[in-house]
Image (cartoon, rainbow, N blue to C red):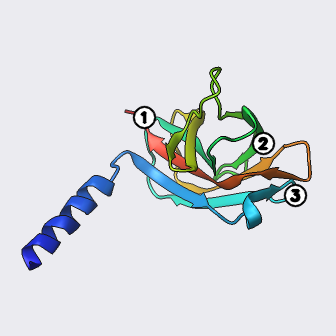
Amino acid sequence: MKAKLILIGLVFVLTSCNKNEVYEEFNRDFIDNRWEVNDMKSFVFENMQSEGVCELKLHFGHISGFQFKEVPLEVEITSPDGKVETLPVIMNLIDEAGKDIGDCSGDICDVFQTIKTFDTLEKGKYKIDIKSKFEGPYLPNALGVGILIERKK
């Protein structure tokens, strides 16, 4: 029995590791699945080593059957030297056939979209702010937003 538990734990650890992942965080702090227009989500991380080419991907979680094809966002990236880069982003959620683009399980969908490629991810502290630019008081049926930074394969 003990050997079986160890084997299960080992399989979990090996399958959950992504050697290309530099940083990942997902914020689920939306009350009533609403992303309020004035609610900016911030992600701060310290890159400890200079990395090769890396991609910054946005992660957006929403309820299946989302009523909008895309969501307008604004992303501000503050690099270790204090330089701020602002990126307007259109997060695509629904394809031309009306189907969810993301990975859906039950009524929850997760969409990842690359928004920037870094030739080199420098050492130091980064801050990434994400704002909804939805035209209304809130974006409905939003479950969360996050970032994933991966080394390009």
Instruction: Indicate left or right for 18 with 127 as reference.
Output: left
Relative to residue 20, is residue 97 depicted above or below? above
Residue 83 at x, y percent in the picture: 73, 46
Residue 99 occupies quadrant: top right
Residue at x 45% of width, y 51% of height: 22
Residue at x 58% of width, y 58% of height: 26
Location of the C terminus by quadrant is top left
Residue 1 at x, y percent in the picture: 9, 78
Q: Residue furthest top?
A: 96
The Cα atoms of the two marked residues, 2 and 3, are separated by 12 Å
Depth check, front residue: 87 or 97: 97
* Number of other residues with Cα within 10 Å of mark 2, as a class: few under 14, some 14 to 19, many 20 or more: some
The residue wearing badge 1 is 152
The Cα atoms of the two marked residues, 2 and 1, are separated by 23 Å
Residue 81 at x, y percent in the picture: 67, 51
Which structural element holds mark 3?
Answer: loop
Residue 88 occupies quadrant: top right
Residue at x 70% of width, y 52% of height: 142
Which structural element holds mark 2?
Answer: strand
Q: Amino acid at mark 3?
A: Asn
The Cα atoms of the two marked residues, 1 and 3, are separated by 33 Å
The mark found on residue 69 in the picture is none
Residue 96 occupies quadrant: top right
Nearer mark to the viewer, of 2 and 1:
2
| Disc nearer the start of the sequence (1/3) | 3
The residue wearing badge 3 is 38
Residue 71 at x, y percent in the picture: 75, 38
Q: Amino acid at mark 2?
A: Glu
The residue wearing badge 2 is 74
